[in-house]
Amino acid sequence: MTDHVGGSLQSLRESNRERLIALLREHGALHRAELARRAGVSRATVTTIVNELLAGGVVVEGAGSEPANGGPTAKRAALTLNPEAGVIVGLDFSAGSVTGVIADLSHQVLADGTRALAPQLGWMGRLDVGVELIDEMRADAGVTGRPLAGVGLGIPGPVDWTTGEIGTSSKSLEWAGARPSAQLAERLGVPVRQDNTAHLGALAEAVWGAARGSRHVVYVKVSAGLSAGLVIDGQMCRGALGATGALGHTCAVPDGPLCSCGSRGCLELYAATPAILEAVRPHHPDASFEGVAERAADGDRPCRRALADAATMLGRSLAGVCNLLNPESIIVGGDLTAAGDLVMGPLRTAVTDHALPIATQALSIGWGDLGDRAGAMGGVALMLQEPESIGASS
Amino acid sequence: MTDHVGGSLQSLRESNRERLIALLREHGALHRAELARRAGVSRATVTTIVNELLAGGVVVEGAGSEPANGGPTAKRAALTLNPEAGVIVGLDFSAGSVTGVIADLSHQVLADGTRALAPQLGWMGRLDVGVELIDEMRADAGVTGRPLAGVGLGIPGPVDWTTGEIGTSSKSLEWAGARPSAQLAERLGVPVRQDNTAHLGALAEAVWGAARGSRHVVYVKVSAGLSAGLVIDGQMCRGALGATGALGHTCAVPDGPLCSCGSRGCLELYAATPAILEAVRPHHPDASFEGVAERAADGDRPCRRALADAATMLGRSLAGVCNLLNPESIIVGGDLTAAGDLVMGPLRTAVTDHALPIATQALSIGWGDLGDRAGAMGGVALMLQEPESIGASS
């Protein structure tokens, strides 16, 4: 499973398959020779890839507009993206919301949406809202007539990759053992895959976003919780059971307060957004995180300090990650993004101050490109990693 | 470079190549049909591998003893390991010593040895001692007449995989920029590769030792320093510049004492052997680490506590590594091995207490199989990863 996903991440990012799909999206209809010329690859390569795309139902032959130099042969060989092909949905759940995107097989996003969720809502109720959101997005995108090819779910906690069950962590004590992907697959009759939301964010940023082209990536999502996704040597790193990236439960302060995971002084207690809100509460009792970020930008000193302290704690832990993994890119996403340089400045300083020089020599640190939609787009990427099954699923 | 090494680690461990070499080592001479039958693989696979081994000079055809059912054809096809093939040396440097092994191309260790080094000795002096050790081991093994095919060097600090230079770390401030592998290659006229000693330990334990068969391995070497080697998805993880595994510089105590790396409270200051000696100094001013381990085994309470404290600090940091990487195996090597269960017990407890349940659910923690020779054997493995160049080098 891990191998397949890893290999497909590489192929999504690096292979010619994506270039051919992009050319067809851009130009509408092209024949094989034009594809080869525009993509700068051999005819044999085009033939191989096109045969796969035809078999998977991603492209069709002989439909769409005339090719540029249409003779009978060229006309017969003109290829277009399959207008009847299925659409793919990514749904990214946090404790308090679900964000969705709907995309076609060429991974163009057609619509998106967000719904609030009561944090105590169980998975049956969460999936009800998710299904409503899917219907709404299909209507918004005008694709109610096209089959749903699959759904990728983002889960705010570890997912045991071997069983599909949600694992035990601080945020998901009541969810442990749940299998929302299986429930949703049964309900919709389509393939549904799930992974931790930060893994999906890493996947999306590595395939389409800020980490594109990097082979060693640490993606950190900082919102109500704090977790990471790792790309190592160009492959998603899921570990023995899929539980990689639980950076929020790194010990930041050895004798710090008890964490809901049962350890003490976990990074999440210092660097996730609830800790920042708690720190400024005496000064701004009802501020939202956006409110804190805005006040800090306007010069409010407690808000600036709370952001800088959280960024420093995060940076210290990321310095340890750099010493351990020597990444090329650290990408930060989630709610923290709203704070901009007031977080990124002290974060960069803390990483550099606490890591070995060689561990950060090749490193860039920055915000993700995909914002709030990173996890949901990662859900789409997760499904696109099995194009054959996507083509066959509806 | 990284890809090649990773791929070869897999092939060393998993491929049929090793089985064929092992059969020839065991049986002396076999023809292709016997190899196929005994290895349980197809004739075609045997033919492919044997052709590579012949081209690399690892095996020869038509020499050695009669095959079991010798007719003219079988006799012509009988294969043996090449008795004239080169030997490979691994030299593993620590600050205070160099340990060497010499092995044949079937990676059987023929001899080994250790020499003390003055910690302040520079690389020219260290290589002098290394060359003497090589000559001594060749004499001990009775292989002075066989060509030296290559040397793998273990370095006690990060090695920049892109330049071959030693990187800046606490232990190697004076060595930064040194290229001992290039110096030794020039001196001996053979290929010399180098890597961090803990990376080599991980490689050797994954290929031949306690981590054999695990795809997600953290090897920790605890001696005068503390560093790690990572195998992720069956591949050596070297990161952007080869600087992975600097676990000794994980922050264990945020406002702890200054470390020579410029950070504070690094794990190495609490869990490496000098910290243990320092802790027991009021009670046992001149004890060696072996002495502390012996006293602890005899019931000395300060020695037991010093070992347990170091193990607990190491376990806390390794819990963070489990949360991040979700490994299947943690293998501990280096001097700490001498302390046995007095370290392993509290270490296991600390890992379990501080990691998320799912992060340790599939985990085993234990000592390495290869002892003091792990790094040097990793040097041999590093050279064996390029069998073609080994065959062609002498």
Image (cartoon, coloured by chain):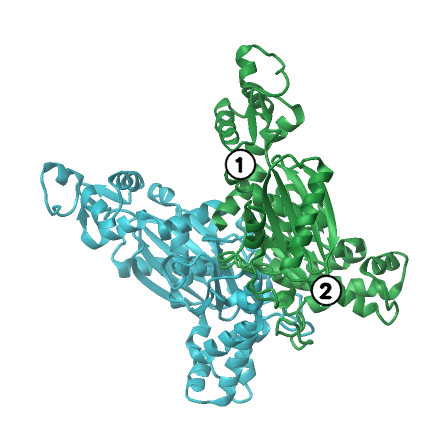
Chain colours: A cyan, B green
Residue A302 screen position, x and y as percent: 52, 88
Q: What label does residue B271 carry, if any? A: 2
Identity, as a three-letter code, of the amino acid under mark 1:
Gly
Identity, as a three-letter code, of the amino acid under mark 2:
Ala
Residue B299 screen position, x and y as percent: 90, 59
Q: What element carries label 2?
A: helix
Q: Can residue B359 be seen in this view?
A: yes
Q: Is mark 1 on a helix, strand or loop?
A: helix
Image side of residue B92 versus residue B15, left or right:
right
Q: Residue furthest top?
A: B71
Of discs 1 and 2, which sits in the foreground?
A: 1
Judging from the image, mark 2 belongs to the subunit labelled B
The quarter of the rendered structure image containing the C terminus of chain B is top right
Q: How crowded is mark 1: few (under 14 residues within 10 Å), some or many (20 or more)?
A: many
A233 shown above or below B274: above
Q: Observer-nearest residue: B320 or B367?
A: B367
Residue bearing the label numbered 1 = B391
Q: Could you tell me if the residues under marks 1 and 2 are in contact, i.e. CB atoms within 8 Å?
A: no
Judging from the image, mark 1 belongs to the subunit labelled B
Residue at left offset 68%, top offset 71%: A254
Q: Do pointers 1 and 2 mark residues of a single chain?
A: yes
**Of the image marks 1 and 2, the number of the one nearer the N terminus:** 2
Q: Distance between the residues labelled 1 and 2?
A: 42 Å
| Count of numbered tags | 2
Q: Observer-nearest residue: A270 or B138?
A: B138
Q: Observer-nearest residue: B255 or A239?
A: B255
Q: What label does residue B39 carry, if any? A: none
